Amino acid sequence: MADVVVDPGVPPDDAQLLRESRRVLIKMRQGWVPQSRRTISGTHYRMIAAFGTVAFFGLLLGVGALGRGLGLLLLVLLGIPMMIVLFVRNDLPEDEEDEYEREVYEQLRWYEGRYVLTEDLDESSARLLARAQRAIATVTTSRVNAEGLLDDVRNGVMLPAQEWEIARLLAKLSALRTKHRETVSQGLTPEVEAVAEPLARALDSSEDAVLARVEALERYAANVTEAERAYLAHHQIEELRGRLHQYEELVAETGADGFAIPELERLAEDADRLEQALRRSVSSAQEAFRYLDP
């Protein structure tokens, strides 16, 4: 099951980044905000540069006054760090992972509300989403879909939209149901209980409505599975049919006509029946798909 379900309206590159950034998204969901980059201001940098330049040349002059040995020691101890400050970089070093997370945060913070994490769902909702995703995978990975026997173009649009809508509704349901349970667990007065019970039924009704969507997807997937079985059997029969003359020739040469001819005739009949079954299966799958079309 996908850990992140993304609104199909999100640009593909950003959607892929969302799917690949689950850890950062979880941190964002928990309120994490990256610290701003720590840099030395331009004014401070110019002051340090001016002071460093004077100090550096002072050190050079001090080499002669203090003697070569002591002067060189001071030059090493003070000059090298100063050169690093002046010429290497004007910001403090930063961990690469922190920098990556900051860049991801900057890109993804605009998409709040357009993705659902599995962590957003309670146990019941997570099971429903998993059922929907299994049904969708059954359709999209089938050979009948790849061969264009189904409406593969509409599948490519409708099924992601169905997955997103189911995930979005389940996330809202999970959040509201969690808050409802927290309130009820504190104990209710009879007056509040009279209000809470209808609200609990409203939550159950909403779950039933989402369940109906999932079951519709599962019926569609079941029809596709049947069409897949018929498709495979049809192709296997066609392969055997393509070699039928070789079987007939072998039977004639071996004198086994009385045993094999009825089987060969049944092979041809099976091919016709499977072709009809395939058409019926595809037709049933298309009917089930129309039920999903709003």
Image: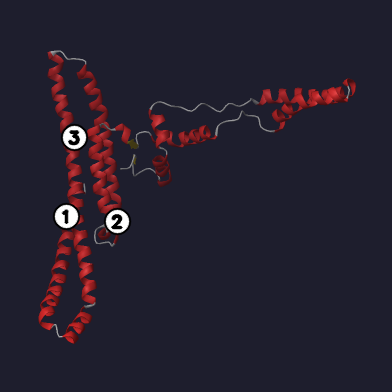
Q: Are marks 3 and 1 in contact (CB under 8 Å)?
A: no
Q: Position of residue 166 (x, y in %)?
A: 25, 40
Q: Do the residues labelled 3 and 2 touch (CB within 8 Å)?
A: no
The image quadrant that residue 260 belongs to is bottom left
Q: Where is residue 105 in the image (x, y as percent from the top left)?
A: 46, 33
Q: Mark 2 points at which residue?
A: 153
Give the mark nearer the N terminus: 3 vs 2. Answer: 2
Answer few, some or many: residues within 10 Å of disc 2's Cα (few below 14, many 20 plus, some between 14 and 19). Answer: few
Residue 287: mark in rendering: 1
Answer few, some or many: residues within 10 Å of disc 3's Cα (few below 14, many 20 plus, some between 14 and 19). Answer: some
Task: Give above or below for 176 relative to 22.
Answer: above
Q: Position of residue 53 (x, y in %)?
A: 78, 26
Q: State the residue in front, 110 or 188.
A: 188
Q: State the residue in front, 273 or 40.
A: 273
Side of 105 relative to 243 (left or right):
right
Residue 52: mark in rendering: none
Q: What residue type is labelled 2?
A: Val
In space, the residues marked 3 and 1 are separated at their CA atoms by 25 Å
Q: Mark 3 points at which residue?
A: 207
Q: Is mark 3 on a helix, strand or loop?
A: helix
Tell me what residue is drawn at x 22 percent, y 39 percent.
128
Q: State the residue in front, 43 or 233.
A: 233
Side of 100 relative to 41 (left or right):
left
In space, the residues marked 1 and 2 are separated at their CA atoms by 16 Å
Tell me what residue is drawn at x 24 percent, y 72 percent.
239
In space, the residues marked 3 and 2 are separated at their CA atoms by 29 Å
Tell me what residue is drawn at x 14 percent, y 28 percent.
201
Q: Is mark 2 on a helix, strand or loop?
A: helix
Give the quadrant of the N terminus.
top left
Q: Which amino acid does label 3 sit on?
A: Glu
Residue 286 visible to the viewer: no
Q: State the residue in front, 50 or 178.
A: 178
